[in-house]
Image (tube, grey):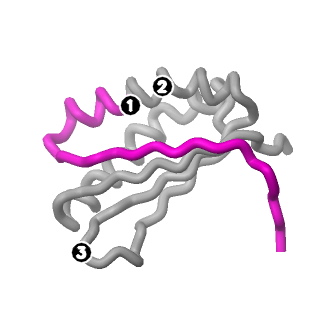
Amino acid sequence: MIEPTLISYITADYKTKSDMKVGMMEWQRIIQDMAPRFKNAGALRQTASQVWNKEGVFRLGYSWEYKDEKAFVECQSLFREAESIFSKKTDIIRKVYSNRGVIMEDVIF
């Protein structure tokens, strides 16, 4: 198994709970359709979660793991393509924030 060396954590804020649910379903359809391309580019894992500790906020979090910096860079063009498809398929407005990091420590319990 390849261990990830880079991660990105992306949050997306929606205006309503309904927008969040529909947005998540559509985004996951797009990512699943593109999954072989993400895998070939070096993405190892994507995890989606709903942020629930912020009252009145409809936020999803996506954690991505990459095998190396090259994989991260190659996936960026795929993300731009996925975002374009999402915008064409929906009129859902969302604010997206990206955070990236190098794994410094990995503790497994």
Estimate the x, y position of residue 33 in percent, counting from the top left.
Answer: 45, 35
Mark toward the start of the polypeptide (3 vs 2): 3
For residue 51, which quarter of the picture? Answer: bottom left
Q: CA distance from mark 1 to mark 3?
A: 27 Å
Viewer-side label of 3, 2: 3
Residue at label 2? 78
Label 3 residue SS: loop
Q: Is residue 33 above or below residue 93?
A: above
Q: CA distance from mark 2 to mark 1?
A: 6 Å
Q: Which residues are magenta?
A: 82-109
Q: In the rendered structure, which amino acid carries the disc numbered 1? A: Ala
Residue at label 1? 82
Q: Is residue 27 above or below residue 20?
A: above
Mark toward the start of the polypeptide (1 vs 3): 3
For residue 20, which quarter of the picture? Answer: bottom left
**Local crowd size for mark 1, using a 10 Å CA cut-off: few (<14), some (14–19), many (≥20):** some
Estimate the x, y position of residue 62 in percent, counting from the top left.
Answer: 49, 52
Q: CA distance from mark 3 to mark 2?
A: 31 Å
Label 1 residue SS: helix
Residue lying at 83% horizontally and 67% vertically, measured from the top left: 108
Q: Is residue 77 above or below residue 28?
A: above
Residue at label 3? 56
Marks 2/1 in contact by CB < 8 Å: the verdict is yes
Label 2 residue SS: helix
User: From the viewer's perspective, is 54 left or right of 87?
Assistant: right
Residue lying at 65% horizontally and 25% vertically, measured from the top left: 40
Residue lying at 24% horizontally and 48% vertically, measured from the top left: 94
Assign the C terminus to one quadrant of the image: bottom right
